[in-house]
Amino acid sequence: MEFLKAENLTFSYRNQYQTVHAVRQVNCAFERGKAYAVVGKSGSGKTTLLSLFAGLELPNSGAVIFQNTPTNKMDRDRYRRDHAAVIYQSYNLFPLLTAMENVLYSMKLKGIRGKAARERAEKELDAVGITPEQYRRFPAQMSGGEQQRVAIARALAAGNELILADEPTGNLDITNGDQVVSILLRLAHEENRCVIIVTHDLEIAAETDEILMMKDGVLEREQ
């Protein structure tokens, strides 16, 4: 069953020198329980495509449709809060909050507080390999791999069923990168999430269920 889809999706923007046609007439569909990779060279349009899926941008034409509702017909802040979690290459953790507080914050936005929030935060931090000793550490006191795992735990604790990961291993070494990919695959296959990973790494892409190839804004191939 289609969970998220793009229909004739087009997006262009103007920079200082020219109009960039970042996404051109893209059609694709995604299901829960699967992990997908969007691959392509820098500038191919893959990160813009992810931004459209997240509702961070609206298409010039066509539509991104989540559970039968186009993103331009919904409250997109609520969409990201309740359904679509974005995991960034740069982690985007709050620097003045501890690992635990970063995860609790995502639930506070949804009205989950107190003991229930704490228990869920501990469960998700444990699931990604963050130990109780690390709960009180600030992002600056953690390695890149640890910060990325906290970012994933934050997305999990919020209960979002759509996980959009933008180059999630780009700042990590091989060991930490492999751990993050394993977590994302588990989310799809064991927790019935829909996971979409933007990456330039073909080895990572090969581990997913389907690969989408982007070239010059065009979805060139799907397998």
Image: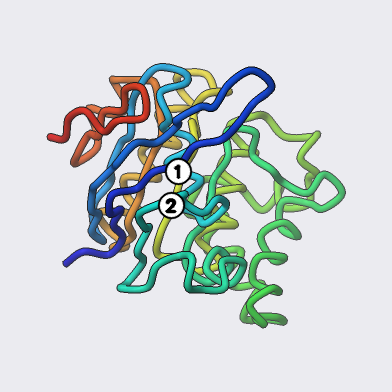
User: Which quarter of the picture shows residue 222?
Assistant: top left
Q: Position of residue 59 (x, y in %)?
A: 46, 51
Q: Secondary structure at mark 1?
A: helix
Residue at (56, 66) in percent of width and height: 76
Q: Which is nearer the eye, 144 or 90?
A: 90
- Asked if residue 153 lies left or right of residue 212, the reply is right
Q: Which is nearer the eye, 188 or 11?
A: 11
Residue 140 higher or lower than 194, as above or below: above
Query: Dot 2 corresponds to which residue?
Result: 53
Label 2 is placed on what type of residue?
Phe
Query: Dot 1 corresponds to which residue?
Result: 50
Residue farthest front in this picture: 18
Label 1 is placed on what type of residue?
Leu
User: Which quarter of the picture shows residue 192?
Assistant: bottom left
Residue 2 higher or lower than 88, as above or below: below
- Quadrant the N terminus occupies: bottom left
Q: Position of residue 158 (x, y in %)?
A: 55, 67
Residue farthest left in this picture: 223
Q: Which is nearer the eye, 109 or 145?
A: 109
Q: Which is nearer the eye, 115 or 84?
A: 84
- Asked if residue 37 lies left or right of residue 114, the reply is left
Pointer 1 and pointer 2: residues touching (CB < 8 Å)? Answer: yes
Residue at (28, 57) in percent of width and height: 5
- Asked if residue 88 lies left or right of residue 141, the reply is left
Residue at (71, 58) in percent of width and height: 100
Q: Position of residue 46 (x, y in %)?
A: 41, 32
Mark 2 closeness class: few <14, some 14–19, many ≥20 residues within 10 Å: many
Residue at (72, 65) in percent of width and height: 105
Q: Whole-Å distance between the Cαs marked 1 and 2? A: 5 Å
- Asked if residue 196 lies left or right of residue 28, the reply is right
Q: Position of residue 32 (x, y in %)?
A: 26, 61
User: Which quarter of the picture shows residue 111?
Assistant: bottom right
